Amino acid sequence: MSPLLISVMVILSCTRSLMPLKICPNCGHIAVPYPLSTGPDCGDQLYKVRCNAGLLWLDALNGSSYMITSINPLNQQLIIRPPGFTNNACIAADYGSQGIELNSNLRFNISGSNTVLILNCSNDILTKPYNCSSSSICHSYIRDNAVAQAACGNLPICCWLKTGGSVNEYRIRVREGRCAAYLSFVNLDMNLPVSKWPEPGVEIDWAFPQEPVCNALRDCKDLLNSMCLPDPASLVQKRCLCKAGFQWDPINGICQSLKCSNRRGCKHRKSKTPVMGGLAIAGVTLLLGIILVTVKVYKQSHHSNKEIEFSLMRAQKDISKANNSGRLARIYNSKEIKKATNNFSSDNLVGSGGFGEVFKGILDDGTITAVKRAKPGNTKGIDQILNEVRILCQLNHRSLVKLLGCCIELEQPLLVYEFIPNGTLFDHLHRARSGKWPPLTWHHRLHIAHQTAQALAYLHLLATPPIYHRDIKSSNILLNEKLDAKVSDFGLSRLAVSDASHVTTCAQGTLGYLDPEYYLNFQLTDKSDIYSFGVVLVELLTSKKAVDFNREETEVNLVVYYGKILKEERLMDVIDPMLKEGASKMELQIMEAFGLLAASCLEERRQNRPSIKEVADEIERIISVLTSAQIKLDT
Ligand SMILES: *[C@@H]1O[C@H](CO)[C@@H](O)[C@H](O)[C@H]1NC(C)=O
Ligand SMILES: *[C@@H]1O[C@H](CO)[C@@H](O)[C@H](O)[C@H]1NC(C)=O
Ligand SMILES: *[C@@H]1O[C@H](CO)[C@@H](O)[C@H](O)[C@H]1NC(C)=O
Ligand SMILES: *[C@@H]1O[C@H](CO)[C@@H](O)[C@H](O)[C@H]1NC(C)=O
């Protein structure tokens, strides 16, 4: 057995007085860093490893188990030893379990840094992603390594591949009829002679742990400065979220103070000099921006070296993982934004919603922008905000308002969006009579519904992590000159921490659009967006406001009113007369179908509402029926 090399990097922290989450005891002489867990009451259960006789093991599926030879908690990586050959034959010792198959319910992945040699294969294997060329490094290895030579010496097929990319993150497979053995090397430099190759190893990544799951306040007693609150990301469970002024440090498993965490004690923050004056350089990618800004901001506010280090590590990791499709977004400084918005003057205020206010801003270069400011008070830490901005910057859909950048210098984080000039859907539907906008035709309304559904489908299904808009309403659907819909205000909710007071005051969402099931468990899900979208669909069909105190008392809430009408089977009566005017029988039927689709979105029970995909498909179907009918009519 080769000497066990354990390289656990311990970060010296000046916040050691803070109680960390339960870190597992050493395994023999080996430290077990958070979040790795060797038992049910320490670490994070999604990061299970096994301690046996002073050595750590990673258990995979089908009963195979691999010795952990090094752990690097700063990079969230560990290295396991591949099994080698069995019985002096060219057969992997874990052939019985078909090679390594990680438990995909845990948070471990095979990293992209492994070069895997595959040996003793059948002819079936001669396909990508394997490189089985006769000049390949695999042959050099067998020639020059005595053990491999003895086991696999005379076999003609010998291939290699690099893990990551399209290659499965959970397994390295051997099996009957394909290949029987493998070896793996971490960060292999193929130009080195075989004698200089490192010991075999398989590098495994783990994802940052999230705050621990909880059901009640007492579950959070191990994580100081946290409270048991609904998880804003998943919305189906609660977690011990750090209180205001603290942020989750996933490396150490603590709620880290955002203020003064260095030993020299708490100096007053310097007045907010615009240190980032020269920093916002257009064309610098946001991620690079994150590094610089994070360092500056942290230095300015006397943050510990450790925190800076942590943020840097993370930003770097993100860069290396970025798939280059990210758009360029800027970091704006506070001076620019204050100037652009006339110091947030009320003249520039163009709207306000559940999560913040929107100001029109004109930048020095003449670009007109919409600057969104999260509500004061309960915003997340800088780190989390940068994280959210990074997520939002990766979003790119023609029916979503574009995020141009952000500003994090002021008390509240700001997001800077493109400005969409032609008013909101609310304006067009409910203020059309003012004469500023001509009434929307049925054709336009269908397209607006369809585009909005597609934008939501993108947020729900293609964004990672999925984003629930949480404040869908007609005044958040902007229209451009061609009356194309641009959904705005998505993601602002991600900047706000939902705290206890938030929950009891129900400040999320907007009256008239809010999922009734929210009151049952205070959770907003994808189906809450569907409900709100259903209200918008009814608005499109009826041109009535979601809430209107000019209507009779029982009809103030459009959903209640609409439900009553449907029960009485009078759907046709509530359709906007302007739409019905001159409509063919066919078109009326289509309006009815549209009305029933809206009703299905408004089902009281979440599970009865359709998914966004189903809604988008149905609207598409309605549109195609309409257009093919029109074509028939025209010919
Ligand atoms: C190659 O693998 C097969 C099983 O697939 C095994 O029966 C055979 O002995 C192996 N060959 C060598 C030379 O070890
Ligand atoms: C390994 O486990 C998977 C799923 O648990 C199963 O499909 C597969 O057949 C197993 N393989 C062996 C060799 O037991
Ligand atoms: C594993 O890799 C997949 C694909 O790259 C990724 O979606 C997933 O988040 C990764 N999981 C962990 C725990 O790193
Ligand atoms: C296969 O690997 C060898 C090095 O081992 C390399 O020179 C060759 O270009 C590779 N072939 C392909 C198709 O990638």
Image: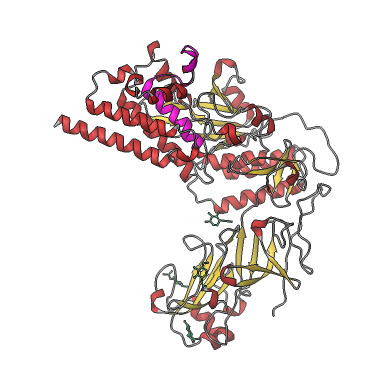
**Does residue 459 show up magenta in the picture?**
no
Q: 246 left or right of 79?
A: right
Look at the picture and state if 377 lies above or below 196: above
Residue 456, given in percent of the width and then of the height, sits at 45, 37
**Does residue 551 show up magenta in the picture?**
yes
SS assignment for the magenta stretch, majority: helix
Residue 581, given in percent of the width and then of the height, sits at 26, 18
Q: 114 left or right of 611?
A: right
Tell how many labels: 0
Q: Quadrant of the N terminus?
A: bottom right
User: Closer to the camera, 609 or 128?
Assistant: 609
Can residue 76 be seen here? no
Look at the picture and state if 14 lies above or below 627: below
Q: Residue farthest to the right? A: 264
User: Closer to the camera, 326 or 50?
Assistant: 50
Q: Quadrant of the C terminus?
A: top left
Span highlighted in magenta in the image: 527-554
Task: Tell me which corner region of the image, top left, top right, bottom left or bottom right, holds residue 379.
Answer: top right
Residue 335, given in percent of the width and then of the height, sits at 63, 26
Can residue 415 be seen here? yes
Look at the picture and state if 206 lies above or below 231: below
Residue 628, given in percent of the width and then of the height, sits at 22, 35
Q: 268 left or right of 279?
A: right
